[in-house]
Amino acid sequence: MTKSENRVPARRRLSSQERRESILDAAAQAFAARGYRGTKMSEVASMLGLSEPVIFQNFGSKSALYAAVLERAADQVRAQMKTMVEHQRSAVDVLAHVLDPSHGHDPQGPRSVGALFSDAATLIGDPDLGVPADRAVQAVIGHLADLVRVAQAAGELRAELDPQAVAWVVLSVLSTRALRTAVSADRRRLERRVSTLVMEAIGGSVPERRSSRSAAGTRRR
């Protein structure tokens, strides 16, 4: 084997945008898992194999990084809901998907949007973080309220419902999952019941319930 065959391939240098995105990914996981106050920048740097100064070179401060994480999370919520609606899923199904604790990731996992915005809500009064936290939470509420309006226009949800109020109920359910997880012996069953209750209260239903009813009807025929 020649010298050139033994050579380890050079590691590709990340662009400045790729570096920022990788930092945002790691920071989102850390902030969602431990909250803003419980997260150290050294932990984020360690997750990426970087030095702490690199984090600050890219974002300037911990509070600026947190604000960027929240802004990106709000944009991701909007993009995900838009994509689901565009792929011919009804707006009410998208709402059910948002609430469903078994739609593909652990609702209390490190990438949980609910955990991020639950933490952000506790920081509204912080002089450094209050504005970005409030802006991000309001953005998510706006996206959810728009989804409710789409469902109402399609006749999927009752017209008299207040879209903003429904949006706050949905975000509140997502943001309090950590509390239920801490005290419930059967979290998944409880989350299913909570999600079903919310959907039934606004005139929709979770997909599994509709499927089971359909199956039950088939068996009766």
Image (cartoon, rainbow, N blue to C red):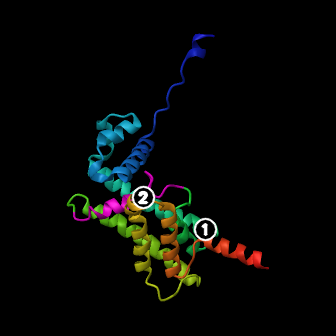
Question: Is any part of residue 57 visible from this angle?
Answer: no
Residue with the most extreme front position? 185
Query: Residue 153: x and y, percent?
Result: 55, 83
Tag count: 2
- Comes first in the chain, label 2 or label 1: 2
**Looking at the rendered structure, which numbered label has been put on residue 73?**
2
**Looking at the rendered structure, which numbered label has been put on residue 86?**
1
Check the image and report above or below for 67 versus 54.
Answer: below
- Residues packed near mark 1 inside 10 Å, few (<14), some (14 to 19) or many (20 plus): few
Q: Is residue 32 left or right of residue 149?
A: left
Q: In this view, does 52 lie to the left or right of 106?
A: left
Query: Residue 156: x and y, percent?
Result: 58, 81
Query: Residue 6: x and y, percent?
Result: 57, 15
Secondary element under disc 1, as helix, strand or loop, is: helix
Is 216 contained in the magenta span? no
Task: Give, as a single range, the part of the protein colored magenta.
Answer: 105-125
**Mark 1: which amino acid?**
Glu
Q: Residue at x 36, y 64 (%)?
A: 136
Q: In which quarter of the image is residue 40?
A: top left
Residue with the most extreme bottom position? 160
Cβ–Cβ under 8 Å for marks 2 and 1: no
Secondary element under disc 2, as helix, strand or loop, is: helix
